[in-house]
Amino acid sequence: MLRDGDGSLRLQTHSGQHMKQRYFFFFFLLSVPLFAQKTTVQGRVLDKSKAPLIGANIFLLDTYDGATSDAEGNFKFDTEESGPQVLLVKYLGYDSVSQQVNLQGGVLEFNPVLRESFNELKVVVITAGSFEASDERKVTVLKPLDIVTTASAGGDTYGALKTLPGAQVSTGDQEGLFVRGGSGTEAQTFIDGMLVRTPFTASTPDFAARGRFSPFLFKGTVFSTGGYSAQYGQGMSSALILDSQDLPERSAGTLAVSCVGLGFGQQKLWKEKGRAIGGSVNYTNLGPYFSLIQQTPDFTHKPEFIGTEGFFRQKTGKSGLLKFYGYYNAGRVGFNTKAPNDSIFGFDVKNANAYTNLSWVGFLNEEWKLNLGSSFSHDRNDIATSYNAGFLNPDTFNIQNSLTQIRAVATRFFGRLTTLRFGGEYQYATDDFDSQRGFGSDLRDHYGAFFAESDLYVTTKLVARLGLRAEHSSLLDQARLSPRVSLAYKLADASQVSFAWGHFYQKGDSLMRWQGQFGGAIPGFQKAEHYILNYQYIKDDRTVRLEGFYKKYEDLVTTLGTLANNGKGYAQGLELFYRDKKTLKGVDYWVSYSWLDTKRQFQWYPSEVQPTFAANHVVSLVAKKYFSKIRTSVGMAYNYATGRPYYNPNPTVGFLTERTPAYNNLSINASYLTMVRKAFTVFVIGVTNVLNQEQVFGYRYSSDGTMRTAISPAAKQFFFVGAFFSWGTDRRQEVLDNQN
Amino acid sequence: MTLEKQASQDLAYPQINKSPNPLFTIISIMRKALSITALFLFALAMQAQTTNEKFVKAMEKALSGMDTLKTAEQWLAASNNFERIAQKETKEWLPHYYVAFCQTMAFNLSQDKTMYELFAKRADDFITKADALNPDNSEIYVLKNMVSGLYIRINPMVNGQKYGPMAALQLEKAKSLDPENPRSFMQEGVTLLFTPPQWGGDKVKAKATLETAAAKFEAFKPASSIHPNWGKTTNERFLEMANK
C-alpha cells in the first residue's frame, strides 16, 4: 500500500500488472463466444408443379450449416448463426433460390419452390421440315459421324442426306439434292449463313457429283426439306445449312490414302492464344482404279483432281471468334460414251474452283449477338463436247460464274429462349457463258435481302417462329416479300408436333442464259408455297417422325417458245422416319420411307406431268453395328425407289408416261479402328451395289426415236479401300492443359 | 504500531511520487503495448485455431459413414455436405475434391441417363477448382482420370477420341507425382480389367497391378484424418474379379 501525495491510499501492482488484469478481461470477452442462440431452419422443397425435390442442398451462405432434402422434400437443420443471413437452395438441373433471412432463435419455416434450369432436352424445338445433325445439341436425329459412316454415301454429305425422307435416292445421274418433287437446283447449300454457289464437284453428264467439302469440316448440319427460316432464301425446296467447326481440339496431322487418291493435312492449335491454323492438300486420280475395274464409258482423261484447303481461326475478345476458310480445286474428266444408233457422245471438262469464307461471331453483351460474314467464290468450266449425229454438234464451252457476298445478322436474346434476329445480305453474282459456235451470255445480278425473324417461346412447350424476308434482284428487276411461319408444341415429355408455312422464291438460274436465244425478257422469280405438318417422338434412343407436306409451285420458268414464267405445279406427300439404337443389341438403324405425288409444267414440258427426277416411293434402310471385340464397325444401306419417268420421243407414247425399272442398291462398308504408332487410324472398305443390280436412271433416244441406250452408272459397282490416320502433334503437357 | 514506527516503515520504501524517469516510462509503455499485442495475437490465434478445428470437424463428420453409402441419392447427399463446406472454404482443395468424388460415385450408381452429363460436368468443375487450389496433387489427378472415364462412358464414339488419351496421361501424372498412392494403381488395374483386349486390356496385367495396389493400400498413411483414404475394400472386390 502506498500513499499518494494527497495522502490517499493506492493499490500498487507490479509494473503493468493491473493492466494485465484489464486486458485479461478484454481477452476473455474476445475468445469466449457470446451466449449462442439456436435457430432451427425447416421446410419442404418443391418444384413448380408441387412435386417434392429429393436431394436438394439447403444451407446458409458462407457457413457449413445446412441439410439435404429427403424423399418427401422435407429438410431440417440447426444453426448457431444469428442476425441477417442468406439461405440458399441448390439442386442439380434447377435454378438456385436465395432468400434473405433474420435469424433470431426459435424455428424458421422456409418452403422454396425451384424452377427447372434451361435443359434443352425439355424445351420444344421447331422440327417441321428439318433434320438436324449436331454434336452440340442433344435433341437431334443424327450426329455428324452418322453422315460420314452411311454405307451408300461414300463419305459424301449429300450421299448420306439422300437416305433421309424427302430426298430422292435414285438420281445418280445428276447433280444435286432432289427434295420433295423439286429439281436439283431448288436445294441450296449455306456455309455459316452464306450461299455456296457450286457445292458439287465438276458436273459431268451421267455422273453423280460429290460435295466439295468434307463432312468433318462441319460441327452442325441442318437439312431442311422445306419451311426453313427467313434468314435463307433462293431455294424453292430445300436448304442445307452447314456450320463450320470452331477451334479444333488439338494440334494434329492427318493422312488419307485410298484407292482413288491421297490427302495430307496439318493443323496447329495455340490454346492460350485461342488460335488455330490448318491446311491440307488432296490429290484424286481415278486412273489406277479404272484400269483395274472396267467402266462403261471410254475415258479419254480419267478423272483427276488436285485441291488445297486452309483455315485460320482466332478468338477475339471474350466471346468472339473469327474464322477464315479457303478452298481451291482443279480437275479434269474426259470420256466417250455410246449414244443411240452407235454414234459416240464425247465429253471433256476442265474445272477450276475457288471458294473463300470469312466470318465473325461475337456477343456484344449478354443480350446481343452479332454474326458478320463475307464470301467469294469463282468457278470455271472449259467443256468440249462431240456428238456426231443429229442436231447437236461438237462444241466447246467456257462457263464461268462467281459470287461475292456480305452478310450481317444481329440476334437479341430475351431471357434464355425467346430471340429476335434480323439482318441483311448482298450478293453479286456473275454468270458468263461462251460457246465456240457463237452463242454466249453474260449475266450480272445484284441481289439484296433483308430479313427479320423471332422465336417466341410462349412457354417452354409452345414456340412460334415468325419471319419475313424481303428480296430484290437487279437482273430480274423484281422484289418479293416472303412470310415464313412455324409453330411447335410439345405434347408430352418426348413428343411434339410442328407446323411450317411459307413462301419461297427463286431466280431462274442457268436457264436465264438462254434469254438471248429464246427472246423474251429475263424471267421473274419462281415461287413455291409450303405447308408442312410434322409429329416427332424421341425417347430412349428411339426416334419416330411422321411428316406430311403440300407444295404449290407458280411462275416456274418455261422455255417453250420464249423464256417465260408460265410453269406451275404441285407436290404432296407423306414421309416416315424411324430410328432405333436400342432394340437390337449394338445395332443402330434407321428406316425412311417417302411417298411423293407431284406434277409440274416447267422448262420444255408441254404439259403438267410427273418430272423425270421424281420417284413416287423411296425407301432407305441404313444399319450399323459396332463389334467392340474386333473394333470394327459394319454398315449397310439399302436404297429402293420406284421407277422414274423418262422421255420417249415416239409420238405414240404419252409425254413422260413411261417409267424406268425400279432402283435397287445394296451397299456395305466396314471400318476398323486401331492405333498405328501414335496415330489414331481408321481402315475403311466399301462396296456399292453388292447384288450387282441393273440401275437405269433414264434413256437416251436416237433422233428418230427407234433406238435407245440406258443411262446407267459408269460402273455397276464401286469399290472403295482407304486408310485415314490422325496423330496429335502436341507435347504431352499441352494435351493435359487443353482439358481446362 | 506507534506513529514513529509507521513513519520509519514508509521511509524504508522508495519514493513513488517522485516524477518518473522518461526512459522508464517509454519502456513501461512498450511493455504494455507488447503485452496487449501479444494478447491480441493470442486471441486471434485462438480464433484461427477454433476455425480450423471447425473445418476439420465438419470434414470428418461429412466423411464418416462414406463406406456405407449404397445409392446414388446417398452419394448426392454426401456431396451436398462437402459442397456446403466448399462454398465457405473457398481456399481448401479437399472439400472440392470430395464433391467431385461423390458426384463420380453417384454417376456410377445412378440409373437415370439424363443426369449423367450433369454429374460429369459437376465433377469436372469441382476437380478443376481443386486442381487450381492445389496443383500437382496425385489424388486430384486420379480423380481427373475417373472424370474423363465418365465422359467416355456417356458417349464412347464421340468423347472417346478426346478423353481416352487424356485419361491415360492423367493417370500417368498421378503415378509420377506420388508413386505410393494406391488409388492410381487401383484405377490402372480397373481400366486394364474392363478394357477389351484389342483396345489394350490385359487381365493378367490387371491382376498384378491390383495386387500392387493392395500392398500400397496396406502401407498407405494419409496426411491427415481428412485426406483421401478410400478404395481399400473396392480394390479387394476388383481383385476378386480379376482372379476369376
Image (cartoon, rainbow, N blue to C red):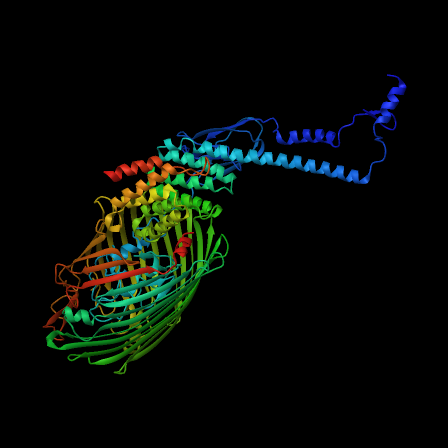
Q: Quadrant of residue B219?
A: top left
- Note whether A266 is above or below B58 in the view shown: below
Q: Is residue A127 visible?
A: no
x and y percent of residue A202 in the render? 26, 71
x and y percent of residue A398 in the render? 29, 78
Q: Nearest the camera: B153 or A377? A: B153
Q: Nearest the camera: B28 or A631? A: B28
Residue found at x 24% / y 72%:
A304
- Note whether B146 is above or below A302 in the view shown: above
Q: Horizontal placement of A440 versus B56: left or right?
A: left
Q: Is residue A196 visible?
A: yes
x and y percent of residue A224 in the render? 31, 57
Q: Image quadrant for the N terminus of chain A?
A: top right
- Note whether B127 is above or below A376 in the view shown: above
Residue found at x 87% / y 23%:
B8
Residue found at x 42% / y 34%:
B78
Residue found at x 62% / y 28%:
A34
